[in-house]
Image (cartoon, rainbow, N blue to C red):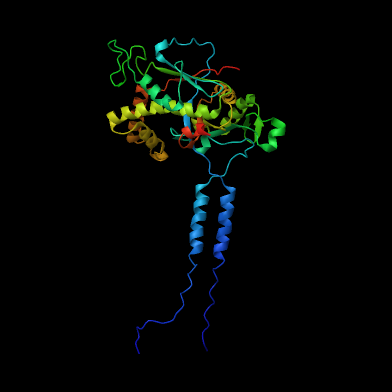
Amino acid sequence: MAKRAAPEVNAGSMADIAFLLLIFFLVTTTIEVDSGITSKLPPEQPDVEQPEVRQRHVFQVIVNSDNQLLVQDDVVEVKDLSEMAQKFLDNGGSTEPGKTCNYCQGDRDPESSENPQKAVISLFNDRLATYNMYATVMNELVKAYNVLRDREAMSRYGEAYTSMVKRAADWPKEDREEPEYFELQEKIAKIADLYPRNLSEGEPTKN
Amino acid sequence: MSKFSKKKGGDVPAISTASLPDIVFMLLFFFMVATVMREDELSVENRLPAANQVEKLEDRSMLIYIYVGKPTAAYQKQFGDNAVIQLGDKISPAARVYDYVNTKRNAMAEDIQNQMMVSLKVDREATVGVLTDVKEQLRRANALKINYTATKGDPMNNLRR
């Protein structure tokens, strides 16, 4: 008697089933955005005396209700903002001994900021400005800080600041007791301290 | 006689589709792994701006989401077409942000409460005024770590449309 082989299962419809599942997942899911510009709000402290900041240390950025940008009383394009902010922060105009900024590479204009520790960027937004403009301006100002920090970190440690921050964020959670991690955090804090993000947001004007 | 002679006159063999399911499954698994289910159902428009100075957000367990934008068509009758705030699944007034953040924070594990971060998902066309109200409330609630959630891209594209 001839031995009968077991019939092969037809796998032709397997593809259809898989397609069905695939299309279901394609339609039902949305990829969530998991990145953004991090910022810190000032804590609420009623009746605290405003620290006196001299005019030369303030970089005034104003956005009006028509999304126009006013920097230091001049109308400018958004694309030039980052460079202007960098120039201001990196000025290092102080000539007093002990206060000079020896790592600054700016023009040392005596009319502009003395050193990055004192320099403040003040941002005013009209309530009717769009978020589009706000996010872009914010991005450009943060970029100014990041460029300067990158440059400084590069010359001190041979690695860009943003790449160090990224490395620290990606550090495996269970290995965060390692001395290398603390060392990295220390470097980041050091650089951030050289160019502190003094970004002050005023109350937007009521219309 | 010749054992190794080529067969002649054979048709072109049909292409085997046996590996097709494997390919499709691979795609399927990719999508299953790469996607995260949305936490809240959106009732406001939410097209995020682009930025290039972005950092990665904290772990999802430490995040609180606040959406700002124009209500979608279904809600415009009730809420008008100015930008509004959405907390959880509901459109709420700005004064509710304080309670919402505190409730969410208390629901977190105690050791991560101080690492909590608020992800502000604001629509491109929303006005800054609403965002300011939200930030005012966040300061009141002492939720100071915030994040303007944005997609990676050239920020100059935001202004060109």
Residue B158 is situated, as x and y percent measured from the top left of the image, at: 51, 33
Residue B127 is situated, as x and y percent measured from the top left of the image, at: 58, 26
Vertical placement of B55 versus A68: above or below?
below
Residue at (56% x, 59% y) in the render: A19
Q: Quadrant of residue B98?
A: top right
In this view, the residue farthest toward the right is: B77
Residue at (61% x, 36% y) in the render: B45
Vertical placement of A198 versus A150: above or below?
above
Residue at (38% x, 25% y) in the render: A83
Relative to A181, A204 lies left or right: right
Can I make out residue B149 in this image? no
User: Which corner quadrant holds the N terminus of chain B?
Assistant: bottom left
Residue at (55% x, 71% y) in the render: A10
Residue A125 is situated, as x and y percent measured from the top left of the image, at: 53, 21
Vertical placement of A34 versus A94: above or below?
below
Can I make out residue A167 in this image? yes
Relative to A191, B38 lies left or right: right
